[in-house]
């Protein structure tokens, strides 16, 4: 018997994590990749364009890569070498983040630098422990639900509703202007709230954010506020939840350089935990998050942090804004294309995502049709939760010429709608 065969036949005595077994077929994006690959195999000459996953495509501004290159080169010298850093992040970066995004609102030692928001969301779940009740916007970024399932915050998946038991899905659709009906939302321990929202592109107003904070304060809940797209905000609304009175008593904010500076591969983000935020027993949340960061994380890469520090300085800020404006111009093209064709179009101004309604048709069917007829990858809205059914998300992250061509292909197929 060959080694491979023997390995394939024998199971260990280790029980599978029952929470992981509850998860559905797969994370949304691997499923999309599978379908894209199948399409490419069946149509080898097609030039498939992806406005799907939402990964950044444009180079990082030189002022930022120069700082990273300098830091990397410095590692080759005695003076420039550094090993483990503080698990919470370099003090100058924490101070720089505070100055750039939370001036006069938060303190540098309330900011924890990390390898990204997705990782922090899971570390927050680990800190909270199993058995916490959770609410999410529906539709929402899949990591909130999936990390809740893995941590043990939920029951089983219910095929009929497309929802996990014991999660409160706060419907966000055009009918309610993409803001949950909080008056009819039950209390949960944790509320995940992404603003501007991925995938709908909707952005809550100051009054709505105040309503959210007041709701959390009334219920003794903690809001995990995901500000990954705050830099795209155009409207006169707060860029951080901590601008809202009361937020320091009920909110944690997570943010990231991924979409700000094209750091999806570099990996750098941060999470802000106010010192005054307390658990039911009166203990400070920040102490437990610090414990998690020092136990499960060993500090963000020193090279990445050098890049982050360049980002929050004046030249880096300009560089980030020029990247953001590039994607915003893409967004305008995509938005206008669908508007001109008479579709129901949402988002695309305060966020790099355009949310397009297809007359109630099933999202996966529309996704498949656009892939088949336009060689274009989008994201089916229902992949973000049942509330996304009937919509597809079109991402503005792409090279300009690809976005232009994608718009032309869409016009050709759907222009006569
Ligand atoms: N939060 C939201 C809403 C996102 O859309 C994404 C990435 O697409 C993330 C977090 C992940 O950020 P990071 O790359 O910092 O892990």
Image: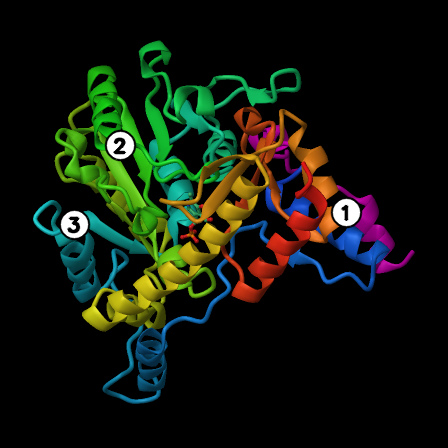
In the rendered image, which quarter contains the N terminus? bottom right
Tell me where residue 185 sits by quadrant: top left
Residue matched to label 1: 372
Count neighbours of disc 2 (C-alpha within 10 A) and say few if under 14, some if 14 to 19, many if 20 or more: some
Residue 277 picture location, percent across and down: 17, 33
Tell me where residue 209 sits by quadrant: top left
- Scheme by which the image is coloured: rainbow
Residue toward you, 20 or 103: 103
Count neighbours of disc 3 (C-alpha within 10 A) and say few if under 14, some if 14 to 19, many if 20 or more: some
* Element at label 2: loop
Q: Residue at x 47, y 34 (%)?
A: 140
- Which label belongs to residue 205? 2
Q: Earlier in the sequence, mark 2 or mark 3?
A: 3
Q: Is residue 174 placed above or below 95 in the rendered structure? A: above
The stretch in magenta equals: 1-24
The CB of the residue at mark 2 lies under 8 Å from ligand 1: no
Residue matched to label 3: 102
Describe residue 115's horizontal placement relative to residue 409 as left or right: left
Q: Residue at x 75, y 54 (%)?
A: 37
Residue 367 picture location, percent across and down: 68, 40
- Which label belongs to residue 157? none
């Amino acid at each position: 018997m060959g080694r491979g065969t023997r390995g394939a036949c024998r199971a260990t005595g280790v029980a599978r994590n029952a929470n992981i077994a509850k998860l559905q077929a797969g994370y949304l994006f691997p499923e999309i990749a599978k379908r894209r690959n199948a399409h490419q195999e069946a149509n080898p000459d097609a030039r498939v364009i992806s406005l799907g996953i939402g990964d950044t495509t444009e180079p990082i501004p030189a002022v930022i890569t120069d700082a990273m290159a300098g830091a990397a080169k410095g590692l080759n010298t005695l003076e420039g070498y550094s090993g483990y850093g503080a698990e919470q992040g370099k003090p100058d970066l924490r101070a720089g983040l505070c100055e750039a995004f939370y001036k006069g609102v938060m303190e540098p030692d309330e900011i924890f630098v990390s390898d990204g928001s997705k990782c922090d969301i899971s570390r927050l779940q680990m800190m909270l422990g199993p058995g916490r009740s959770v609410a999410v916007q529906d539709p929402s970024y899949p990591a909130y639900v999936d990390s809740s399932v893995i941590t043990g915050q939920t029951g089983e998946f219910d095929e009929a509703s497309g929802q996990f038991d014991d999660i409160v899905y706060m419907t966000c659709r055009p009918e309610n202007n993409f803001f949950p009906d909080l008056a009819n939302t039950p209390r949960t321990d944790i509320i995940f709230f992404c603003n501007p929202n991925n995938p709908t592109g909707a952005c809550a107003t100051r009054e709505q954010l105040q309503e959210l904070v007041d709701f959390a304060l009334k219920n003794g809940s903690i809001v995990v506020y995901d500000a990954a797209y705050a830099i795209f905000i155009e409207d006169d609304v707060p860029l951080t939840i901590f601008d809202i009175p009361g937020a320091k008593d009920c909110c944690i904010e997570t943010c990231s350089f991924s979409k700000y500076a094209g750091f999806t591969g570099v990996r750098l983000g941060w999470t802000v935990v106010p010192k005054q935020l307390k658990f039911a027993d009166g203990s400070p949340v920040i102490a437990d998050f610090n414990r998690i960061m020092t136990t499960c994380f060993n500090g963000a890469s020193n090279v990445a942090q050098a890049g982050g520090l360049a980002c929050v300085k004046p030249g880096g800020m300009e560089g980030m804004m020029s990247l953001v404006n590039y994607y915003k111009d893409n967004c305008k093209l995509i938005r206008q294309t669908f508007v001109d064709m008479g579709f129901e179009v949402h988002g695309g101004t305060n966020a790099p995502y355009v949310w397009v309604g297809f007359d109630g048709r099933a999202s996966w069917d529309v996704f498949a049709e656009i892939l088949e007829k336009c060689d274009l990858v989008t994201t089916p809205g229902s992949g973000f939760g049942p509330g996304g059914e009937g919509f597809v998300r079109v991402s503005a992250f792409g090279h300009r010429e690809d976005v232009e061509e994608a718009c032309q292909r869409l016009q050709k197929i759907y222009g006569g709608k």
